[in-house]
Amino acid sequence: MNNLLIDYQHDVLILFKNNYRRLITKSMNVTFNEIFEATMMELNIKRSSTDDTHFLEKWFNNIHHQAYLLNFTIGAFTEIIFHSNKSVQVIGLHEKTNFELEDIDSEDFQLSLEVLALKNQVSWNFQEPFSSFNVVLGDLNLRATLIHYSTSANLKSKVFLRSIPTNTPSLDLFKLEESPLSILKNIIAEKKNVLISGGTGSGKTTLLRSLLALIPHDEHLIVLEDTYEILNHHPGQTSFLANKEQNNKSLKDYCAYSLRMSPDRLIVGEMRSTEVVPFLLAMNTGHKGLMSTIHASSAVDALSRISLLFSLFSESNDISFALVTKLVCKNVDYVIHMEHKKIIEICRVIGSDAETPFYERLYSA
């Protein structure tokens, strides 16, 4: 055994790290053996089959393959937040759990995130401090969001890993009684226009996916989103993924294109910006079965919020807010509000008076 590897473990690791940094600038497909051979050559030591390389392999797997991230993906979770190289928060279906991360220092944590971005051909640095992309870690499909330390007062980068389930969720997941379950099934069967509202992580997308599973297979379903989350197995589905950095590939553009493709239903992953205009106008021209999600604190707040978005992003400055509210309440048939993975309200929209929406609450948890 080469006792030097053990006796001078710290110094060998520093040299190994330096070789790793040098070699990944040439290729992201670098292997452990390549780096180890380069390190041994610099030390002028011949490699032996009895070399104890465990500490080097562990470091390589943590940095190059982000192995430490996988330690927290064993149980069921919706999102994992690495606040730093020490603090981890796992958000489950019904609870949040905090953990302390061990065996990785702040410098290595930063390097591992930079490598994760590079391996996925994503730009993430001082100039572009926010990055979000799909990634496969182990056998898991995840949405990774990186926040660069340059944006933080404590100079710590963060990574958010959101689970992307590949199976189609069932309405049984929401443990509804027969009455609200029947309402939801009828909403889909009758091709009503629906908004699903709630806060971040409230279960909006999960409910949307479960409702899409009820759509007959002979219909043409068009799904528009800017984050790939609506994994659906509908045979007649056309999907578009928006990219704000490319011309003619925004949700607004796709919304306009979709209306020329004979859609039976149009689904927009989330209402946030200019896409609200063609979406609502499509409703107003008679299209049925339109669905989307929106961040709001209640069902009635969802109607006010979508009215506000239309007012902000419409190019017609002379339309009053009362008229916009009337447009919204005339075309949105139902609002379903979510909190903590539960359906809290199902409201049927009746109309409006000036800027005040009128609705009937069909279900309240």
Image (spheres, rainbow, N blue to C red):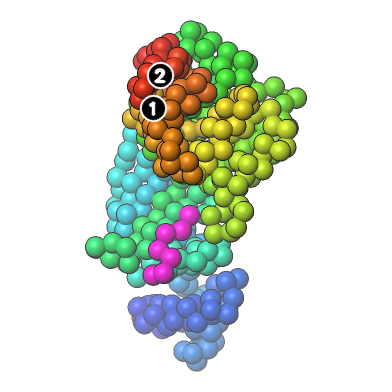
The one nearer the camera, 315 or 347, is 315
Location of residue 363 with respect to 49 vertically, above or below: above
Where is residue 143? Give x, y as percent: 50, 49
Which mark is nearer the camera, 2 or 1? Answer: 1
Relative to 316, say whether 33 is above or below: below
Q: Residue at x 60, y 41 (%)?
A: 255
Q: Position of residue 310 (x, y in %)?
A: 45, 37
Look at the image and tell me in which quarter the C terminus lies. top left
Label annotation for residue 299: none
The amino acid on which the numbered mark 1 sits, given as a three-letter code, is Ala
Q: Residue 268 occupies which quadrant of the picture?
A: top right
Q: Position of residue 67 (x, y in %)?
A: 47, 58
Task: Pick out the residue farthest to the bottom.
Answer: 44
Question: What amino acid type is highlighted by mark number 2?
Answer: Ser
Q: Quadrant of residue 17?
A: bottom left
Q: Residues within 10 Å of mark 2 (few under 14, many from 20)?
A: some
Disc on the earlier residue, 2 or 1 = 1
Mark 2 and mark 1: Cα distance apart in space: 8 Å
Q: Which mark is residue 352?
A: 2
Q: Label 1 neighbourhood size at 10 Å, few (<14), some (14-19), many (20+)? A: some
Is residue 301 rendered magenta in the image? no
In the image as oriented, which residue stretches furthest toward the top? 179
* Element type where label 1 sits in the image: helix
Q: Residue at x 49, y 90 (%)?
A: 42
Residue projecting furthest to the left: 153
Residue behind mark 1 = 322
Q: Which residues are magenta?
A: 126-132
Q: Element type at marker 2?
A: strand
Q: Residue at x 69, y 27 (%)?
A: 264
Q: Are marks 2 and 1 in contact (CB under 8 Å)?
A: yes
Give how far across and how far down residue 41 sits, in percent.
53, 88
